[in-house]
Structure formats: C-alpha cells, structure tokens
Image: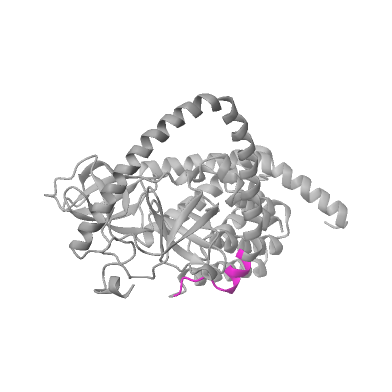
Amino acid sequence: MVAFLVVALQTTWMGYLMPAAYKPDVFLILVIWTSLRMPFMIGIGLAFAGGILVDTFSGAPAGLFAIVYCLVFVMGCYLDGLFRIDTRPGRAITVLMATLVSGAAVLLWSVVVGSGGYSAYVLSWALAKSVMTAMASLLVFPVLDRAWAMYTTLVGAR
Amino acid sequence: MPRSVKDIAIIILLIGGGLLILFWPTKSQEGGPVARAIYSVIGPLQRVSTAAYRQVTGVWNGYVNLIHVRQENEQLREAVKGLKRERGALLNAEMENRRLKKLLNLKARNEFPFLVAQVISEDAVGWYRTFFINRGSEDGVLPEMPVTVAEGVVGRVVKNAPDVSQVLLITDPNLSVDCRIVRTRNRGVLTGSLDGACVLRYINLESGVGPGDEVVTSGLDGMFPRGLPVGKIASVGKSSQGLFLEARVIPHVDFSGIEEVLVILANTAGFDLKPGLDEKR
C-alpha cells in the first residue's frame, strides 16, 4: 500500500514541486529504509516488486529497476553490517551512493542499447539528483519510522 | 546482511528474474495483465492527486490574478482587436492555401483524426522523459501513435492500458524522429538529449544549416506526419567522426507546462510511406 502511495506521489505532486529531472527518488529511499528495518526476505521481495512497479511507471525497460533496487537493498544491508549506517548522516550518504548506482545503471543501459551516452552534463545531473534524494531522505526516514511505529503499535507485532 | 545460502539464493533468483524480464524479447508494446492491474490501482490515485493539485493552484492563481485584473482587461481588449484583424487575414490566407493545394492535388497533412488527452502524471523516477495521459486502448490509442500540441511535436505513445497510456517525449534519448530543416530541406535524425534539448544527427556536411533554422518532421519515418514543427537549431558542429554535422535543437514545446495533448489516431507506418494512403482515408 505504501509502495502504491509512493508511486502515486512520485508521479504527481513531486513533479509539481520541482523539475522532474531533479526530483528525489522516494522509492529508493523506501528501499534503503526496508534494508535497515525489515527482515531480509521481506525487504528484498519488496525491493523487487517495487522495482517492477517503478519500471511500469517510468520509461525504463521492464526489469531494470527491479534489479537496481535489489542491488541497492543488498548494498544497504551490507553497508549496515559493516559500518552501522543507521544514523542520519550514514543514511543520507547511503542514499546518495544508491542514487548514483541507480543513475549509473540507467546510463549503462542506455549505452548498451545505443540510445545515449555520458557527458559532463549527465554526470553533474546525476550528482545533483543524488544530492536531492539524499536531502529528501533526511525528511522521509523519520516519516517512515513514525508510520512504522504507529503500524506496529496498532497491529501489535514487529 | 545476507548470511545464509538461502539469502544468497534469493538474491541470485531475483536478480536473475530481473535480467530475464529485461532481456525477454517482446514484440507487443501493449501492457500485459500485470501492468494493466498496476495501472488500474494507481491510475485513480494519480487522477485524484492531479485534480487536487489543479484545484489548489486554480484557487491560488485566481486570487493572484484578481489583483491585476483591470489593467490586464484593458490590455486584453486591445489584444483581441489586433487578433481579430489578424484572424481575418489568416482565414483569407488559409482559404487561398486550400485552393492552391487542391489545384496541386495535394492534401493538407493535418487531416488526421485526433483525440484530446489530459496529462495525468509524469515519469516515476525522473531519469527518463515520459508522462502518462488519461486515454488508452478503450479510446483507440495505440503504441506508436504521435502526440502533439499546438506548438509542435511532443512524442509518441509507447505503452498503453485500457484507460491510460505512456508517452515518450522527443527529449528522451530513446526516441528518434526523422526530421527536415525547413530552409535547406536537408534531413537528419532527431534524438533526445539528457540535457533537455535534442540533437539532430546525420546532416550533410555541405548543407549550410545554422542557428535559428526551423526543424520539422519529414514524415519519412512513417510515425509522424510530415511538416509538424519540432524546434529551432541552437548550434551546429561536426559529429565526432567528422562525416556529418550535428545540431543542437531547442524544442518549441515547453514540456514542463503541458496539461493537454493531441494524440493523432493514425496507426503505425501510416503517413507518407504507403502510396495512396491519403485517398483511402
């Protein structure tokens, strides 16, 4: 349900607030959040399903974001195991890196299919978008934490 | 962190599944049952969200507009007078144009049936240049159909569901359009560029194109009708191999402000490639 709401928000209101090219990838933040808060099996399943959902609502070929979000999820788990990234700066840096990974995957695919190439502009754009997403994560993480706490209080399980 | 063999197996399975989907050869661009189900869940959410946003901005803009409304009214009255004069002249020119075309046994290229559609949402992640419209296969919209606005070409339909379709914009690197430069009549292939403009490739080195030249669709790709305005050349340079010229084209359409579009209801490869198609229509 949260995934559907995030996609609806991402495709409508988010674009009205800022240029589409620079809007933060809220779904990616959600994937990083699940990598820190959810059991592995559930989290990676959500990452895959969420990737398919994002593929459907973007110009990406089916499967690209499913793979990217799975990789990002594993990356989040791995980094948390190594460095304990569950702090505000740690999460922001992880989101920044994950957005760069996601941009690199998009760029790599466009190079593979011969529809685009990289340039200084593209690299600066990817960096700007990653910074925007990292900044947005500072707001989104507490909201998700609060929503999760309310949900677990209501349902009575964690 | 994945610790067990089972976790690693799940990772391999899911990434393998993703790769399988990514490289699966698909001929049809119509959304499958999963995509249709997803669209049917998120479509209403998007519509409600877009309607709410327009309602809020409508009220705000109405308030702001009231402040300058009197002064603007006077200016508009003057503008209407001028436009009425201009319209008369244009109607005459249009009538003359039609007569001449009839004489030359040519048909106006904008006679294709079209459908007005509303933009309901945009690309989910922003790495691509796409948006969604509120018309789908139930309204006769099919993949490959051209999408335009009054200012010029917007893009083409890439995926559709019964009541929603995805439009790929000409500024996306995944879309190519065969174009012609109006002044020199040279052809080139227009593709999107990630910086929001477009690049016109494969222009003849001797063509003499320059900044300010108008670019229109050639109709030779069988996808877009001939003569639709696309944009204006901003700069020209040699391609990396040095065999052709490449021009940076600024589209006429402001993609960020589009609310409604026209979908040209002509099927694939139906514009200029098949002789006698105009007569059949």
* Lateral position of residue B212 relative to residue A105, left or right: left
Name the image quarter holding residue B42. bottom right
Q: Is residue B89 magenta?
A: no
The residue positioned 60% from the left and 34% from the top of the image is: B62
Relative to the observer, which residue lies in front, B260 or B211? B260
Find residue B66 and report its horizontal and vertical position in percent: 59, 29
Q: Is residue B31 magenta?
A: yes
Q: Is residue B97 above or below residue B11?
A: above
* Lateral position of residue B58 relative to residue B98, left or right: right
Find residue B27 and report its horizontal and vertical position in percent: 43, 75
Q: Is residue B182 above or below residue A40?
A: above
Residue B207 in view: yes
Q: Is residue B268 above or below residue B150?
A: below
Q: Which residues are magenta?
A: B28-39
The residue positioned 42% from the left and 66% from the top of the image is: B265
Find residue A103 and report its horizontal and vertical position in percent: 48, 50
